Amino acid sequence: MSIKRTPSPVFSSGDYVVYPTHGVGKVSDISKQNIAGTELELLVVNFDKDKMTLRIPVAKVEHVGLRKISEASTINDALTTLKGKAKVKKIMWSRRAQEYENKINSGNPVAIAEVVRDLYRNENVAEQSYSERQIYEQAFERLASEIAVFDNTSVDQANKKLLDILAK
């Protein structure tokens, strides 16, 4: 029995990509570099918001989970998830926080939308703890940045779009 392997995505300079633990970045270059006597082909990804540059060996791109911006169906699933009712489990906050962090770091827009939906608080609802707010903002920013690139709009417009959906 053979294992089916999907071909690894091909990236080119100027592509927007999602690195699961850092969010949306832009491929600025694909270069060859000699490291410890071995020539490696590296994908150079810039994250403007964090003022950070990552150099990822092309051979490891699939392993680290680097992917292109989501398809329309995935973005629509994420937006539909936001419209749902919050599902807060009755377990300790530390365990829930760990689950939320794992969902955010998965890079999956639908999982990130679940975190945003579950931690969203309307103005007239009780205050959030500092850690809840931090996790919510991280998830919200990740989702908004991917939607902004997908819709070819600004992050502010994506933020407004998400807040409009959540407020309903």
Image (tube, rainbow, N blue to C red):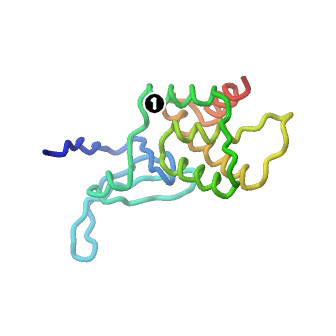
Q: Is mark 1 on a helix, strand or loop?
A: helix
Front position in the image: 105 or 29:
105
Q: Which residue is drawn at 62% across and 42% down?
A: 115
51 with respect to 61 (left or right):
right
Q: In which quarter of the image is residue 50?
A: bottom right
Left or right for 6, reference 163: left
Identify the residue at the far left of this view. 1
Q: In this view, does 157 lie to the left or right of 67?
A: right
Q: Residue at x 71, y 38 (%)?
A: 120
Give percent across and percent down for residue 42. 30, 58
Residue beneath disc 1: 74
Q: x, y percentage for residue 123?
A: 83, 35
Residue placed farthest to the bottom in the image?
36
- Which quadrant of the structure image shows residue 168? top right
Residue 84's place in the image compared with 65, above or below, is above
Where does residue 71 sit, x and y in percent of width and height?
41, 30
Mark 1 burial class by Cα count in 10 Å: few <14, some 14-19, many 20+? some
- Residue 23 drawn at (x, y percent): 51, 48
Looking at the image, which residue is at 24% across and 41% down? 6
In front of the other: 89 or 36: 89
